[in-house]
Amino acid sequence: MPDTGVYLDYANANAVVFYRDAAGIAVRRLSVPLGSGVKPDVQSAVNRVGADHVYTYSVSNAVSATQPVSRLVVNDPAVGKPVSLQALTGPVMPGGKGEFTVSDKRRPGLVRAIVRGETPEVALPADLPAAARADLIKLQRTSLSGNMTFVFGPRFATGATNAEIAADYLAGAERLAKLRQLDKNSPFVRDMLTALVAPDAAAAVAQLANKPQTAREMEFDRALRLALR
């Protein structure tokens, strides 16, 4: 058994804390449930309504999940700060599905989404050292306390230029290709990557010859066309 410290028990979706009692003699063990027992599939769809963009998120939780989904936190990967915090209307049980919408004036871009499971409240013992308490809270706030994926969400303010947006989508496409969510050998993806480095990316994207075929390609194409003006 470790002497002291905070460890991740990924198999059981727990944080495990080993710490010494107030007398500094006995080593105690504390298990705190994390929200990482979910197995989600998140789909995003974007539509423009007037001056706003309406983002619809569909969250499924696999039958093999050990926790209900209780929250989807959408973060901007560039700055790491939440741009939208949305609690689902009810927990998505294993084998279930939930959906919600967010309206925002910002144009769509690829953002990080952390899906967290429903966990019981755990009263921390009074003799838990401050350092261990701080490490535990830090772990609870990271993506390790949930399941991370990428979706399209509010990202670009009114002043963003097409060049900035195209560069960001190019980086996003590379990221999704590494995750095997986009295939760089796909005719659509090849055309789209070429269009994003064109002098006028908006015009090049509007004239793409090959159409998106997979669900992820269609999601990417829709968001990109709404982002570029």
Image (cartoon, grey):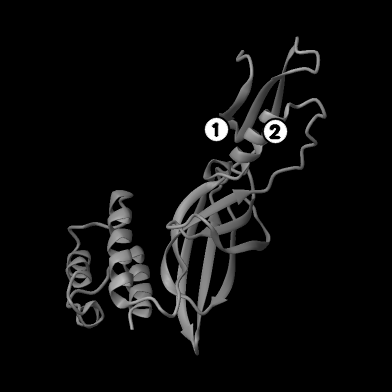
Picture coordinates of residue 177 (x, y %)?
Answer: 28, 54
Picture coordinates of residue 150 (x, y %)?
Answer: 43, 57
Residue beneath the point at 21% across and 68% down: 188
Per the image, label 2 sits on a secondary structure element best described as helix
In which quadrant of the rendered image does the C terminus lie? bottom left
| Residue type for callout 2 | Arg
Task: Please identify the quarter of the rendering in which residue 30 is found.
Answer: top right
In the image, residue 114 above or below residue 218: above
Q: Which of marks 1 and 2 is in front?
A: 2
Residue beneath the point at 33% across and 55% down: 176
Asked whether the viewer can see residue 94, the reply is no
Closest to the observer, 80 or 39 = 80
**Circle 2: is it few (<14), some (14-19), or many (20+) Cα within 10 Å?**
some
**Circle 1: is it few (<14), some (14-19), or many (20+) Cα within 10 Å?**
some
Instruction: Check whether the beta carbons of the residues at disc 1 and disc 2 lie within 8 A of each other.
Output: no
Per the image, label 1 sits on a secondary structure element best described as helix
Q: Name the residue under label 2.
A: 133
| Residue type for callout 1 | Tyr
Left or right of 9, for residue 132: right
The total number of labels drawn is 2
Task: Please identify the quarter of the rendering in which residue 121 is found.
Answer: top right
Q: Mark 1 points at which residue?
A: 10
Name the residue furthest bottom: 50
- Numbered circle sitting on residue 114: none
Gap between marks 1 and 2 measured at Cα: 19 Å
Picture coordinates of residue 95 (x, y %)?
Answer: 58, 52
In which quadrant of the rendered image does the N terminus lie? top right
Residue beneath the point at 17% across and 69% down: 191
Marked residue nearer the N-terminal end (1 or 2): 1
Picture coordinates of residue 192 (x, y %)?
Answer: 22, 69
In the image, residue 130 above or below residue 204: above
Left or right of 229, for residue 56: right
